[in-house]
Image (spheres, rainbow, N blue to C red):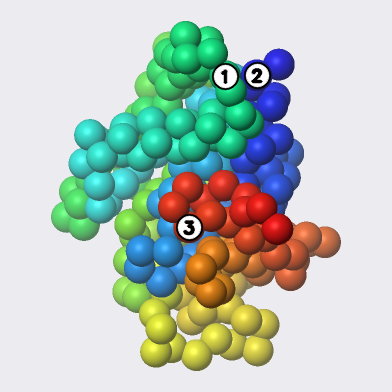
């Protein structure tokens, strides 16, 4: 029951819908630096953990320690959002689900899609359930990623794993006619889903750029926690 209550409070559920999160191939969370891309990706991943699914979180910008801190903080924000929850109950649930998340820290020189493939093959070799979601945080979409994305698209086909990316946009760059930052425009055809985080007065607004009928929906978030803001 607590798992479902937490999922229903998630900004990912309200903006995208949890059944939609792994329903495509590639998804993106876009924003300028510091607005909340990684935090929103963590909330997306937490909906999968709370659904008893496995998550692979790959970061090119955070250490393993920082990745774990982000998940701890994201879970704590969800717990706080539903009011009083017995601390021991909340801790037991976190101990139950956090082990379904694997974090891997790379940098630009060590990131390699073949390493990810080998890791996923290890699940198959051990006859273990595969992750349903992969988060890749920190790829530089200001560079040519055509080959990397083609390799990752093949991973999606081979393993049935949905992949969500962070994309950093820049204040000085204009949006295209669809409201897309250039980083998404360059790879538009590859992405089924995209959420754009922007600052609106003292709130963060999540704008659904791509997701079928949900496109153009908007959700106000608390910038500190990324939980849905009270109207």
Residue that carries the numbered disc 2 in the rendered image: 2
CB atoms of marks 2 and 1 within 8 Å: yes
The x and y percentages for residue 186 are: 50, 78
Placement of the C terminus among the 4 image quadrants: bottom right
The x and y percentages for residue 130 are: 52, 25
Q: Please tell me which of labels 2 and 3 falls first in the chain.
A: 2
- Residue 131 in view, yes or no: no
Placement of the N terminus among the 4 image quadrants: top right
Picture mark count: 3
What is the spatial separation of the Cα atoms under label 3 and label 1, in whole angstroms? 23 Å
| Discs 2/1, front | 1
Left of 150 or right of it: where is 53?
right
Q: Quadrant of residue 221?
A: bottom right
Q: Quadrant of residue 22?
A: top right
Q: Please tell me which of labels 2 and 1 falls first in the chain.
A: 2
Q: Nearer the viewer, residue 76 or 71?
A: 76
The x and y percentages for residue 61 are: 25, 53
Q: Residues within 10 Å of mark 1 (few under 14, many from 20)?
A: few
Residue at 47 percent across and 47 percent down: it is: 225
Q: Please tell me which of labels 3 and 1 falls first in the chain.
A: 1
Q: Residues within 10 Å of mark 3 (few under 14, many from 20)?
A: some
Residue that carries the numbered disc 1 in the rendered image: 85
Residue that carries the numbered disc 3 in the rendered image: 223
Dot 3: what SS? loop
Q: Nearer the viewer, residue 228 or 53?
A: 228
Q: Is residue 116 above or below residue 212?
A: above
Left of 14 or right of it: where is 39?
left
Residue at 21 percent across and 57 percent down: it is: 108
Q: Is residue 92 above or below residue 188?
A: above
What is the spatial separation of the Cα atoms under label 2 and label 3, in whole angstroms? 24 Å
Furthest toward the left, the residue is 109
Left of 90 or right of it: where is 12?
right
């Amino acid at each position: 029951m607590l798992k479902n209550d937490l999922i229903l409070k998630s900004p990912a559920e309200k903006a995208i819908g949890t059944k939609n999160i792994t329903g495509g191939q590639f998804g993106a969370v876009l924003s300028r630096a510091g607005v909340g891309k990684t935090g929103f990706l963590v909330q997306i991943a937490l909906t999968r953990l709370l659904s008893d699914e496995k998550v692979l979180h790959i970061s090119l910008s955070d250490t393993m320690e920082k990745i774990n801190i982000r998940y701890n903080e994201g879970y704590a924000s969800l717990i706080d959002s539903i009011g009083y929850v017995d601390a021991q109950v909340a801790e037991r649930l976190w101990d139950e689900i956090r082990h379904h998340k694997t974090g891997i820290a790379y940098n630009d020189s060590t990131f390699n899609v073949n390493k990810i493939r080998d890791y996923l093959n290890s699940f198959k070799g051990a006859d273990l359930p595969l992750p349903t979601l992969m988060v890749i945080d920190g790829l530089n979409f200001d560079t040519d990623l055509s080959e990397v994305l083609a390799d990752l698209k093949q991973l999606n086909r081979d393993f049935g794993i949905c992949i969500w990316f962070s994309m950093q946009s820049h204040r000085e760059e204009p949006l295209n006619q669809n409201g897309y930052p250039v980083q998404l425009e360059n790879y538009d055809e590859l992405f089924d889903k995209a959420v754009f985080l922007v600052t609106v007065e003292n709130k963060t607004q999540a704008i659904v750029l791509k997701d079928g009928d949900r496109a153009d929906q908007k959700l106000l978030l608390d910038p500190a926690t990324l939980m849905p803001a009270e109207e």
